[in-house]
Image (cartoon, helix red, strand yellow):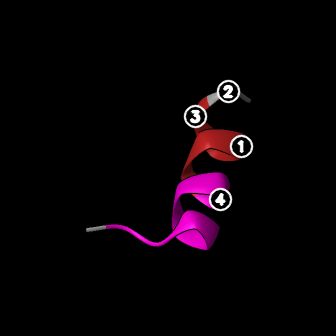
């Protein structure tokens, strides 16, 4: 499972 911090980072980069 991915950590919330990691998810937030990925999401921010994905929703760039």
Q: Sort mark 1 into few (<14), some (14-19) or many (20+) by Cα contacts within 10 Å.
A: few
- SS under mark 3: helix
Q: Sort mark 3 into few (<14), some (14-19) or many (20+) by Cα contacts within 10 Å.
A: few
The spot of residue 3 in percent (x, y) is 47, 72
Name the residue that disc number 3 marks: 14
Magenta highlight on residue 10:
no
Please identify the quadrant where the N terminus is shown: bottom left
Please identify the quadrant where the C terminus is shown: top right
Name the residue that disc number 1 marks: 12
* Distance between the alpha carbons at the discs numbered 3 and 4: 8 Å
Name the residue that disc number 2 marks: 15
Q: Sort mark 2 into few (<14), some (14-19) or many (20+) by Cα contacts within 10 Å.
A: few
* Distance between the alpha carbons at the discs numbered 4 and 1: 5 Å
Name the residue that disc number 4 marks: 9
**Side of 2 relative to 8 (left or right):** left
Label 3 close to label 2 by CB (< 8 Å): yes
Label 2 close to label 1 by CB (< 8 Å): yes
**Side of 12 relative to 11 (left or right):** right
The structure residue drawn at horizontal position 53% and vertical position 56%, both measured from the top left corner, is: 7
Main secondary structure found in the magenta portion: helix
* Distance between the alpha carbons at the discs numbered 2 and 1: 5 Å
Residue that extends furthest to the left in the rendered view of this protein = 1
Q: Which region shows up in magenta? A: 2-9
Label 3 close to label 1 by CB (< 8 Å): yes
Label 4 close to label 1 by CB (< 8 Å): yes
């Amino acid at each position: 499972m991915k950590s919330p911090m990691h998810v937030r980072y990925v999401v921010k980069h994905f929703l760039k």
